[in-house]
Image (spheres, grey):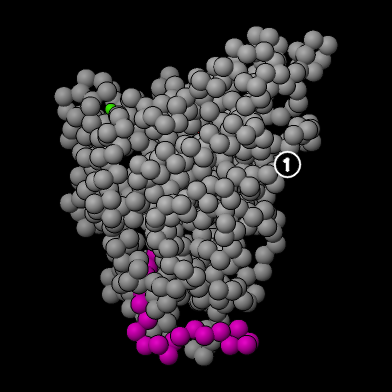
Amino acid sequence: MSTNWWHDAVIYQVYLRSFADANGDGIGDLAGLTSRLDHLERLGVDAIWLNPCYVSPQRDHGYDIADYCAIDPSYGTAEDLKALVADAHSRGIRVLMDMVANHCSDQHQWFLDAIASAPGSAARDRFLFRDGRGVDGELPPNNWQSVFGGAAWTRVDDGQWYFHAFDASQPDFNWRNRDVVEYFDGVLRFWFDRGVDGFRIDVAHGLFKDSAMPDALGDGHNYAMWDQPEVHEIYRRWRAIGTEYEPQRYFVGEIWVPTIEAMAQYLLADELHQAFTFDLLVQPWEATRMAAAIDRALVQAERVGGPPAWTLSNHDVHRPATRFGQEQHLDAPLPTDMIAAARRRGDADLALGVRRAKAATMLQLALPGTVYLYQGEELGLPEVFDLPDEAREDPIWLRSNGEELGRDGCRVPLPWDAASPTFGFSPPSSTSAPWLPQPQWFADYAANTQDLSDDSTLAVFRRAIAGKRDTFSGPDIDWLASGHPSLLAFRRGSGICAVNFGDSPVDVPREWNADAVLGSEHIGDGSVIPANSAVWLTVVRDDARTTVGSDGTSPAGLTSTTTGIHGPTGPQSHMRSNDAPQFT
Ligand code: GLC
Ligand code: CA
C-alpha cells in the first residue's frame, strides 16, 4: 500500500457559513476561517474540507450553485480564497473544496437559458426536461420522489417538467450531454490551478439516471435514480485530470449505494481515492454493532486496497453528542433511510452523550484510515433543538412543513468566546445577528474556555489527534477478546484501543501487558476503562503479541481475529454484502 497523505489523515469539515464571521454580517466567511487557522493547527488537522462557497442563492446553503468558478460575495473574494490556501499550506494544512455536479441552482445561466428556450432545444438538453403524463401533461413524468420530500419534478410555464433529486431550486444536470462533461473538466482545473488539493464530491452516485426513467416500485431504494454504470467513466476522467497535477489531486465521494460491491466500483485505482464510511455514523452506542461496522469497512478497504474514511458527523446529521445521549435504538435503521436515522428528535442526556462522543472519536482515530471531523465536534457541541421555527432555513424543514427538523441544528454558528456577543462568531462591533440564533447555553461550550482546561473535550481531541500516529500503526487490526460484552478492543501495531460501551468500569485485562497512555476520561492508574469511555494503551512486553494461530487463538491465550487492508481472516470478518449501509 502506498502511503499517500490521506491514508492516515485527520480532515476537518468547515461549514463556512457557521465557522467564523470576519466582516460582521452574521455569516461566516473565508477571512474568518483564515483568522481561526491557529485553532485548526493546534487541533492538529492535516486538511480542511470546505462546504460549497461558490456563488449561490443559498436555497440549500451553497449546494445550489449559480457560478462554479466564483466565490459567493457573502463568503468573500477570490483573493480571500487565495489567502486562505496560502496560509493553510504554510501550516501544512491541505484545502479540499466541495464539487456539486449532480445539480446546479435554478439561477445558473444554463438553467435560465433552458427555461427561456423551447422544449427539445439544446439548452434544455443540458438538464432533464420531460413532457408530463395525463391528458394535458399535467402529471409528472414519473413517480420519483425528491430526497428532500415531495415530487422530484417541477413544471415550467410551457408545460414541460424538469427533474430535481433535491429542492426545486436544484435542477439535475443531464450527464449524457457532452457540454456538461466538458464544463466540469474546466471547473476542476479552475480550482486545481488555484492550489486546491482535492474535492469532496456531493452525491457522487447520483449524476446519471436510468435514461428510461421508469416509475419506482414501492417506496424503497429507487435503483433507476442512482448508481448508473456511466458514472464511472466520469470519475475515471476526473482522476486523470487530478493526476495531471503534482502532487496529484484527491477525491472523496459522498456515495450511498446498497452493496459493498457497488461501492467498490467507485474506488478502483483509476476512480475516486476514497468514499465516506458512513457505517459508524449510523450505529447506536453498542459494542457489537460498532465492531461489525468496523469489520465491514475493513473488508471494503481490503477489496479496494485503500483505507476507509471514517466519520461520525457532518452538516447533514444531528450532532453525535446529542445522538449518543438519546435513547439508543438497537434495531437497524431502515435501509432506505439511513441518514434520517441520524436525525431523530428526543431528549438527550448530554453529559453522557459527550462522554460517548469523545470515546467514539478516540475509536475512529485509532483505526487504520482517514478521519473526517465536523466543526464543533472538538467542542462536544450538541445539536440545537430549540431553534425558533421561523429561524429554520433547511429545505428539508420547509418541504416537510416542519415534520422533519432538518439540519439547521448542526449548523448553528460556533461559540469561540464565552464572554463576547455572538460568542465571538462575529466581531464585537457587528450589528447583524448570526444567521442562525445561538442558544445561551452555547457559552458552556466556547473554545476559549475549553482552551484553558486540560479536561475539556477540546483537550481530549488535541491529545488524541497528536498521539494517534505514535500509538497506532499499520493497516490491520487484531480484535482482542476480553470476556466483557460491553468492551470493544483491538490492537493495531503496538497500540491497543479499548472502548467500554457499558455503564460500569471494566478492568484492563492483565494479559494485554499494556500501559494506558490516553483516556477520553480520567484514567487514574490506568487499571480500569471507565464507563462509556475509551482508553488507548501501548503494549510493553511483546509476548502478548496476538498473532492469530490456526485455531484463532493467540500464544497469549487471547482469541483474536485480524481484519484489515491486507486481508480479513477469521470468523468476525464474514459479512454479507447486504449489511452495507444503504442509500438515504
Ligand atoms: C448532499 C449534501 C447535502 C445537500 C445535498 C444536495 O447530501 O451533503 O448537504 O443538501 O447533497 O446537494
Ligand atoms: Ca461575514
Position of residue 270 measured from the top left corner of the image (x, y, whole percent): 57, 56
Q: Look at label 1 and name its amino acid.
A: Tyr
Q: Which residue is mark 1?
A: 223
Q: Is residue 553 left or right of residue 37?
A: right
Q: Is residue 280 left or right of residue 205?
A: left
- Helix, strand or loop at label 1? It is helix
Residue 544 lies, in percent from the top left, at: 44, 87
Check the image and report above or below for 226 versus 59. below
Residue shown at the point (28%, 70%) measured from the top left: 524
In the rendered view, would you say 152 is above or below 326? above
* Residue shown at the point (75%, 22%) measured from the top left: 141
Residue 362 visible here = yes
Q: Is residue 280 left or right of residue 576?
A: left
Residue 74 painted magenta:
no
Residue 58 vertical placement versus 291 (above, below): above
- Residue at 63% x, 13% y is 117
Q: Could you say which quadrant of the image residue 497 lies in? A: bottom left
Q: Is residue 535 magenta?
A: yes
Say which quarter of the image contains residue 296.
bottom right
Residue 316 image position (x, y, % from top left): 49, 39
How crowded is the residue under tag 1: few (<14 C-alpha within 10 Å), some, or many (20+)?
some
119 with respect to 474 (left or right) = right
Please indicate, yes or no, whether residue 295 appears anywhere in the rendered image. Answer: no
The magenta segment: 533-553
Looking at this view, is 520 or 433 the one in front? 433
Residue drawn at the location 35% of the way across and 45% of the way down? 195
- Image coords of residue 407 (percent x, y): 47, 34
Ligand 2 found in image quarter: top left
